Image (cartoon, rainbow, N blue to C red):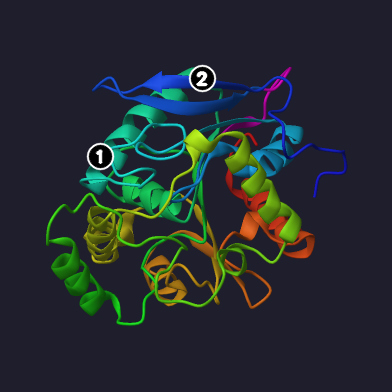
Amino acid sequence: MASFPFDRRAIPAGASITHWTTRDSWALRCFSWPVTGAPRGSILFQGGRGDVIEKYLETFAHWHSRGWTVTSFDWRGQGGSGRLTDAGNCGHIADFAQYIEDFEAFARDWMARTPGPHVIMGHSMGGHLVLRGLVEGVVRPDAAVLVAPMLGLKGPFGAALGERLARLLGGVGNSARPAWKSNERPYTTDTRESLLTHDPDRYQDELWWQQTNPGNVTGPPSWKWVIEAFRSTRELRAHPALRTMDVPVLALVAEHDGLVDARAALALLAKLPDARIVRFGKESAHEILREVDKVRNRALGEIDLFLEARVRGA
């Protein structure tokens, strides 16, 4: 949507990659891009499972060009924020509460050191964790944006049976081992590319970054991650505070998403007292902000309008 040339395969001038240390001395890989002059406000954007900061540089550039400072970090155990298991590049977590602890500490520090108003955004797993953090009251930004949020896992067996099977299969042996060998879903014939985006060039950008920084590549999740993802999404869907969480929310949902359960997301989002839901059809795969220009521009336009209408001082 930006009208200026942008190199999606380079860290932009003025931005920096650093590390932020958690309470237990874990180093999270961070991205910071301040603006020159008076900022419109600050955005904290959190990616999904296996994501790295670099996948969203083009989107960061759009918000930065509109006057927003932009910050992001790779979740613990993935990207450039280290690993929690010896099983190669497996994405592991013992409990999603650990993600929330990191998110709470980082977001509070971020809000204290960056200019308001403050907006927190999350894609996929990041969307789930952002909403869970809001519902649990660990942080209160001026607004939130959820992009293809992981509010239910996509699977052939349904949530209840899927969770039981995950606990059965993952409970045998080391639950930190990879749940499958490759791809985003073990039971599908769809390619990883088709599950993520219809834009081949943007998909190739991700592969380029993987080849450039192979140490940041996160492979399949561990069985424990799968088990905890089922549990965390189930508990969030039933959380009584959903109906009283009044932070303004914009949610972008891809109805034909092959990775997360769009129907579960729509049902949960309907419980929020102040949420605008924008639906995308077959034109969009999971990564709405990395889709073909027509889809991506619509998504960015919806976010811009939401921020202008709902964020005071923006």
Residue 185 forms part of the magenta stretch: no
Residue 88 image position (x, y, % from top left): 36, 43
Q: Please, what secondary structure does the residue beneath circle 2 have?
A: strand
Residue 200 image position (x, y, % from top left): 73, 60
Q: Is residue 173 visible?
A: yes
- Residues packed near mark 1 inside 10 Å, few (<14), some (14 to 19) or many (20 plus): few
Magenta residues, dominant SS class: loop
Query: In the drawing, what numbered circle is on residue 18?
Result: 2
Left or right: 201 in relation to 243: right
Which amino acid, mark 1? Answer: Gln
Left or right: 162 in relation to 205: left
Q: Please, what secondary structure does the residue beneath circle 1 have?
A: helix
Query: In the drawing, what numbered circle is on residue 98?
Result: 1
Q: Residue at the spot x=27%, y=35% of the render?
A: 101
Q: Residue at the spot x=87%, y=43% of the render?
A: 3
- Residues packed near mark 2 inside 10 Å, few (<14), some (14 to 19) or many (20 plus): few
Q: Is residue 245 above or below residue 254?
A: above
Choose top left, top right, bottom left or bottom right for residue 40. top right
Q: Which of marks 1 and 2 is nearer the N terminus?
A: 2
Q: Residue at the spot x=81%, y=44% of the render?
A: 2
Q: In this view, does 247 lie above or below 35?
A: below
Which amino acid, mark 2? Answer: Thr
Q: Closer to the camera, 169 or 181?
A: 181
Part of the protein shown in magenta: 35-43
Measure how far apart labels 1 and 2 are at the Cα level.
21 Å
Q: Residue at the spot x=64%, y=69% of the render?
A: 284
Quadrant containing the C terminus in the rendered view: top right
Residue 31 image position (x, y, % from top left): 55, 28
Residue 143 image position (x, y, % from top left): 50, 45
Q: Is residue 11 above or below residue 217?
A: above
Whether pointer 1 and pointer 2 mark residues with C-beta atoms closer than 8 Å, the reply is no
Q: Closer to the camera, 42 or 49?
A: 49
